[in-house]
Amino acid sequence: MRTQELVERPHSVDVPEEMQGSVYHQEGNTYGSKKFYIESYGCQMNFSDSEIVASILSKEGYSSTADIFEADLVLINTCSVREKAEDTIRKRLEYYKQVKKTNKDMLVGVLGCMAERMKKALLEEEKLVDIVVGPDAYRDLPNLISRSAEGSRQINVLLSREETYADISPVRLDSNGVSAFISIMRGCDNMCSFCVVPFTRGRERSRDAHSIVSEAQDLFNNGYREVTLLGQNVDSYKWKSADGNEHVNFAELLEMVAKINPLLRIRFSTSHPKDITDDVLYTMAKYENICKYIHLPVQSGSSRILRLMNRTYDADWYRSKVNRIYEIMPDCAISSDIIAGFCTETEEEHRESVKMIDFAKYTMSYMFYYSERPGTPAAKKLPDDIPNEVKIRRLNEIIEKQREVSAAVNKQDEGKTFKILIDGLSKKSDSQMKGRTTQNKVVVFDIHPYYKIGDYAMVKITGSTTATLFGEIIPEKN
Ligand code: SAH
Ligand code: SF4
Ligand code: F3S
């Protein structure tokens, strides 16, 4: 439905995960004779996984291509989080069917969460799919590819309690050479009632802390200046060495990565409000290079709805967490995820979500209306009883409030000077560059001859919109 498409797009420059389809290709990787083409959908974890897949394939002699028509292998890394995400994937599979008519030997593989959720049914439903691989089975890809090239369709959707791909060096795809993702854990042990992720990603497990630090160090040595530590719930990161002598929690991991070099910025995502500790907040405050930005999804502003969602905190508890963050780091930015129209939500409860945006002063939010996912606790136990048009109207009210708050908090930045990391050229103008503040706000400014991508610069903010700050460089170099 058109209106749904329009309203589900959030106001900010950050596009909701499932809409960020991206074609990956690696320049200059010409050593393989066979070519793969990969598209990724969903959250950052999926984008990071595609880099692991690229690494596994490059060891098999594959090189990547951005041209689907010259690919021997077409892969799509999929998301199941909302129905619309899966619809997008189905449309892409339709398109691949057309492409396959021009290249009968081309293999099509479905990776990621939809592969895991649908398993064999995907092979039955989508006749052109040759390979189905779940998120914990990517090491098996070479076997599955060679067997499917012999003519039989292949599937591996086994979930693992140990797999973290710790020893695999991701091949950086579509990279700006400045920022990279590092996956620090996999899976999720929470059971938010609306969410399909625990079913598609399996049990939570943390990656060897030293492999994380050495990946970050390598990135820094190669010129990268920002890493984002990724997990569904990074604050519950907990790693123990095999001999049991060494224990590392998230605050300690943050410190280990922060110490690599003051010029390396550290971000992380996502924080579950129930798990973020004072230790994490104090560690953030202690290191200038740990960015003052927390994505702290509230999901709903109503305690009754939060209970139905099984989020394990209530609205007051969340508000006190927000207060604590601002108390320890007054300059910290907070963003959120909000779901409109969850099962049985009343108008009054909806208004509590709207109010939470004002209270927490989110710089931005990802906003969705509830989409029932098969097999989740909510699908089993709760009625999806809010009519579509009501969900859409509530979502629009949430988006409107977030716009207002984003505009107001951005306006307050005008006249101030921020240290930004320059990460690319402006999409809209050849004569402008862009970067981010520690608070993760995008700043656009005129190109300056002394500054290039990957440099830090002081920028004075001269204007703002709901999604972007505009400014000018205050040169420090000469
Ligand atoms: N691990 C992260 C979120 C992962 S999914 C966390 O706990 O915050 C990303 C977001 O998608 C969620 O925060 C939620 O807002 C949204 N989402 C998940 N399932 C959904 C559903 N069934 N309908 C609508 N939105 C959903
Ligand atoms: Fe889903 Fe909740 Fe886990 Fe996030 S914490 S991935 S919302 S179950
Ligand atoms: Fe989607 Fe899977 Fe991420 S369901 S949001 S790609 S963990």
Image (spheres, rainbow, N blue to C red):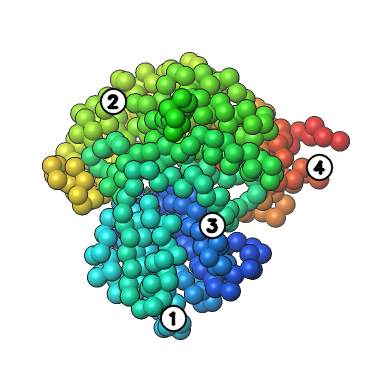
Q: Earlier in the sequence, mark 4 or mark 3?
A: 3
Mark before the other along the chain sequence, 1 or 2: 1
State the residue position of label 1.
105
Distance from disc 4 to disc 1, alpha carbons, whole Å, reads 51 Å
Outermost residue, right side: 478
Please tell me in which quadrant of the rendered image residue 347 appears: top left
Mark 4 vs 1: CB contact within 8 A: no
Mark 4 → mark 3, Cα distance in angstroms? 35 Å
- Label 1 vs 3, first from the N-terminus: 3
Q: Residue at x 47, y 71 (%)?
A: 73
Q: Return the residue at label 2.
A: 313
Find numbered disc 1 in the image and state the secondary structure of the residue it sits on. loop
Which numbered disc, 3 or 2, marks the residue that appears first in the sequence?
Answer: 3
Q: Amino acid at mark 2?
A: Tyr
Q: Nearer the viewer, mark 4 or mark 2?
A: 2
Across and down, in percent, residue 45 comes to: 44, 47
Q: Are marks 3 and 2 in contact (CB under 8 Å)?
A: no
User: SS class of the residue under badge 2?
Assistant: loop
- Checking the image for residue 450, the label placed there is 4
Mark 3 residue CB less than 8 A from any atom of ligand 3: no
Judge the density around disc 4: few (<14), some (14-19), many (≥20) Cα neighbours within 10 Å: few
Distance, label 4 to label 2, CA atoms, is 49 Å
Q: Residue at x 23, y 33 (%)?
A: 310
Q: Quadrant of residue 30?
A: bottom right
Q: Which residue lies at the image location 62% right of the left edge and 27% below the top edge?
A: 259
In whole angstroms, how far apart are the C-alphas of marks 1 and 2?
A: 52 Å
Q: How dense is the environment of label 3, judged by Cα within 10 Å: few (below 14), some, or many (20 and up)?
A: some
Which residue in the protein does label 3 denote? 55
Report the side of 193 relative to 106 (left or right).
left
Q: Using a 10 Å C-alpha cutoff, classify the residue at mark 2 as few (fewer than 14 neighbours), some (14 to 19) or many (20 or more).
A: some
Is label 4 in a helix, a strand or a loop? loop
Three-letter residue code for mark 3: Ser
